[in-house]
Image: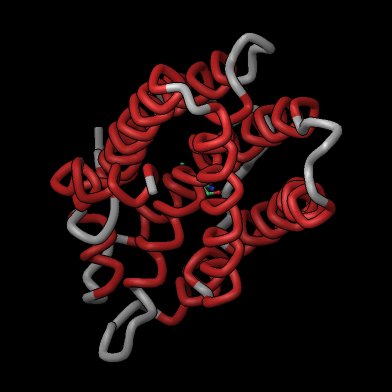
Amino acid sequence: MALSQWKSRHAELYNRATTHHPYIVSIRNGSVDLSCYKRWLGQDYIFVKAFVRFIGSILAKIPSNASDETLMTLLSGASALHDELQWFQKEALVWKIGLEDLPPKKTTQDYCRFLEDMSQPSVDYAVVLSTFWAIEHVYFESFAFCLEPGSKTPHQLVEACGRWGSPSFGSYCDLLRSIAEAAVESTGSNEVKQRGEDAFVRVLQLENEFWNMSTDVS
Ligand code: HMH
């Protein structure tokens, strides 16, 4: 079970990208500076638009002998982004943020560049699936943590946390993991496994930087 091993092998970095990050902790304990949330919202909208193209590249790589369940799961992941972008547009109106022409910050640019690199036809299906799972799973863990019993997440942020922290999003992440796991195992290639793990680590670094950017007042 390669993918679950990656989490324990990179536990410290994993925690810094999820439940130990000061931004996530501040949402959960209610002390979050709402200007950080607004910064995150605008930059994540830019990220999700780039994510659409990355998912498109994954759809193009689905092998013709993939199971119907795999096809449907990946397709529903792609179509959920339509609703997600609409949610960002609606949420931006609530917070009075202009999304048109919002300049990407350096970390957002770095993350979008990574997604572009991972969208190249030469990158293995198993590696991109592992990357896809990692990106979604990190958000699930972070936001589910903010919704646990006893958390003091500000009421204005509960809906946002619920988008990624809900049990149904968690089940979707589990499905993605089993699809990625099967793809990695079926290659039987240690090199592919290693490239998947490298991508996983890179995602954790970028996610940590993304949270840092959200709290950075500069
Ligand atoms: C930066 N990582 C980032 N944004 C997201 N929306 C997700 C993961 C999950 O879709």
- The mark total stands at 0
Q: Residue furthest left?
A: 12
Q: Position of residue 155 (x, y in %)?
A: 44, 81
Percent x, y of residue 167: 53, 77
Q: Which quadrant would residue 26 be assigned to in this image?
A: bottom left
Front residue (pair 143, 77)? 77
Say whether residue 86 is visible: no
**What residue is at 52 percent from the left and 68 percent from the top?**
170
Q: Is residue 156 above or below residue 207?
A: below
Residue 152 visible to the viewer: yes
Nearest the camera: 148 or 191?
A: 191
Q: Residue at x 19, y 42 (%)?
A: 9
Residue 66 vs 168, above or below: the answer is: above
Q: How is the image coloured?
A: secondary structure
Q: Is residue 12 above or below residue 191?
A: below
Residue sitting at 20 percent across and 41 percent down?
A: 10
Q: Residue furthest bottom?
A: 150
In this image, 146 relative to 176: left or right?
left
Res 58 quadrant in image:
top right
Q: Position of residue 96 (x, y in %)?
A: 59, 55
Q: Is residue 210 left or right of residue 187?
A: left
Quarter placement of the C terminus: top left
Q: Nearer the viewer, residue 87 or 102?
A: 87
Give the side of residue 182 with respect to residue 75, left or right: left
Expressed as whole percent of the image width and height from the top left, the position of residue 4 reads 34, 51
